[in-house]
Amino acid sequence: MVAVAGETAPRRVTRRRVLWVLLVVAAVGAYLGFRTAGAADSDDAAAFRFFTGVRNWVDDNRDTSPLFLYGVNYLRLGVRLLVDAVQAGLYGLGFAGLVAAAGAVALVLAGWRTALVAVGGFLAFGFLGLWAESVDTLVLTVSAVLLAVLTGVPIGVLAARVNWVSATLRPVLDVMQIMPTFAYLAPMTLLFLIGEPAAVIATLIYAVPATIRITELGLREVSPTSVEAATALGSTGRQLLTKVRLPMARPTIVLAVNQTIMMALSMVVITALIDAPGLGQNIIRALERVNVGVAFDAGLAIVIMAVVLDRITTGAARRRPATRGRSRWVVAGGALVAVVVVALLPIGQDLPRLSFAGPVNDLTGWIELHWYDATEWIKNVVSAGLLDPLESVLTSTPWWLFVLLVAAFGTLVSGVRSAAVAALAAAGIAGLGLWQHAMQTLATVLVTIVLTMAVGIVLGVWSARHDWFAAGLRPVLDAAQTMPSFVYLLPAVALFGASRFTAIMAGFVYAFPPVVRLVDRGLRDVPATVVEAAVSAGSTPRQLLWKVQLPMARGGLLLAANQGIVLVLAMVVLGGLVGAGALGYDVVAGFSQREDFGQGLAAGFAIVLLGILLDRLTQGFHHAKGPR
């Protein structure tokens, strides 16, 4: 049996290589035989008319339909009441009271070190001269997170206990996460008008998938032996949930709250486009004037807010309070009394102003002046040598040939099921009437992914092999992940002008931090015994990396590619603001121009289908064992 297995493995590898060569040759031949001139997309596709018809129906029935009178309007009113209550509570504390409250909450939940971070962070809002804007952003974030937790945790519990609910929710959550954030805004304003309620609901839609997924994961990972023991002792289903599953999943559920907060913060900034107050308004105005310094101040305030909220929630998940019983209540009561006392003190926010706008603008101007030749050369080389040829090939490929090639390559690398889903996604894009724009977007996404993976793998390998490098890189990655994506656009525009390459650079900055982290984690998770065995066998550091660590971290690398694709697609729409065109511009135009609403919404769904196509191919490749 061993001999047979040893003979069949090389044959399988050889057959796979032959299939690859034949498929590549067939693809090249089919492209040369059937390529087209790449005609422009229609401005009046059936999908555009359908979505425009939905908008017209909503406009005509907003004041008469029971769906709006007794459903949407009451939902909007409820969200308004919640926002007003949170706003009254935070503003009612005043400057000193809110700083003290942040410190008190951090002290009780995460310890005195986190309390110092919280106090310093909230004081920084005053020093930056952005106190009112920061509180407005915090109001929207708290409101959206409260709704996400109140709805997402119960749904996550249900999904963990009922398999068909989980299977039904999975594609819905995929669409909610891949759908560009801009695409949420037009339907939100259509249903809920502009302002805080629409902003909170759009943020809820963007953030609640993280709450549901992580809650479900936490409950499914509860030890089966603990559940069996509780069942053997006669616990009911309700007791199992409240006394065993939820307490044991508490750290994961707190992590779900943490990730929900991070996603809500990133979305709240974008909702400034539908008249939501807060720091997003400062960033939008700075973007209109290409004022990097003003955007940096507002972005820094958001980063500080994200760091404070992140430290509080992660501290709450990890910390086992040393004070229990009566002493814990004494700490909480003392913190509450301190907050009340400080809130009553006549302390205002008249702090000395500390702004980085001037130095940042000076630095940006110097770089723009002295690095112009280098940045232009980089932009032209990448555009002419990589982006333009790839876009030309994709846009001149007939849609039916592209679908067939996706099905063929997908079957070879990912299996029949993943290939079928990817091919259906490609056919769906053609059905939406946006094939040329989708192929232009795909070219930009692929170039960005190549750049992101190349840099991310190099930095991830260095980070995994050198702890000092990982420690120095961590704050850079933290800032890149929490800084609002709008802020990335400003220095990119200043350095490269309004072009497709500007969108590529903005997408790269947004996507490379998680790629670096996942590559680092994947290499560090390679079993130490395997590494020691390879070293004992005489492997050099280069051989250890290429022959042992990278192959064994293959799953982490593919997950990094998958997450990079999702994040790059999230930046496609913002790229439409800086000259990238294609689907990103369609979504932006659909949001800002009434006559393009149908095309904009269709473009949003086209981006979702692109995400599903690329996701199924990369994740299916991870699970593939060979030709099927």
Image (tube, rainbow, N blue to C red):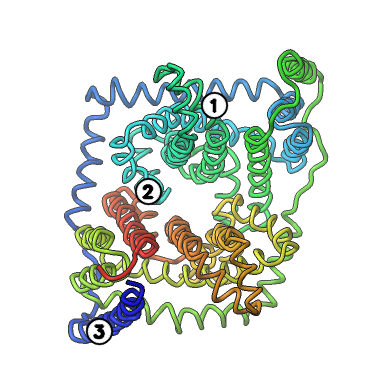
Front-most of 121 and 242? 242
Q: Which mark is residue 183?
A: 2
Residue 235 screen position, x and y as percent: 44, 17
- State how far apart marks 2 and 1 are (Cα): 38 Å
Q: What's under tag 1, amino acid-wise?
A: Pro
Check whether the beta carbons of the residues at disc 3 and disc 2 lie within 8 A of each other.
no
The residue under the point 69% across, 61% down is 470
Which residue in the protein does label 1 denote? 247
Q: Residue at x 59, y 60 (%)?
A: 527
In the figure, is residue 172 to the left or right of 477? left
Quadrant for the C terminus, please. bottom left
Q: Label 3, secondary structure: give it.
A: helix
Mark 3 vs mark 1: which is more N-terminal? 3
| For marks 3 and 2 on the same chain, the one whose residue lies earlier in the sequence | 3
Name the residue type under label 2.
Ala
Is label 1 in a helix, a strand or a loop? helix
The answer to whether residue 518 is above or below residue 285 is below
The residue tagged 3 is: 22
Viewer-side residue, 460 vs 118? 460
Above-or-below relation of 181 to 444: above
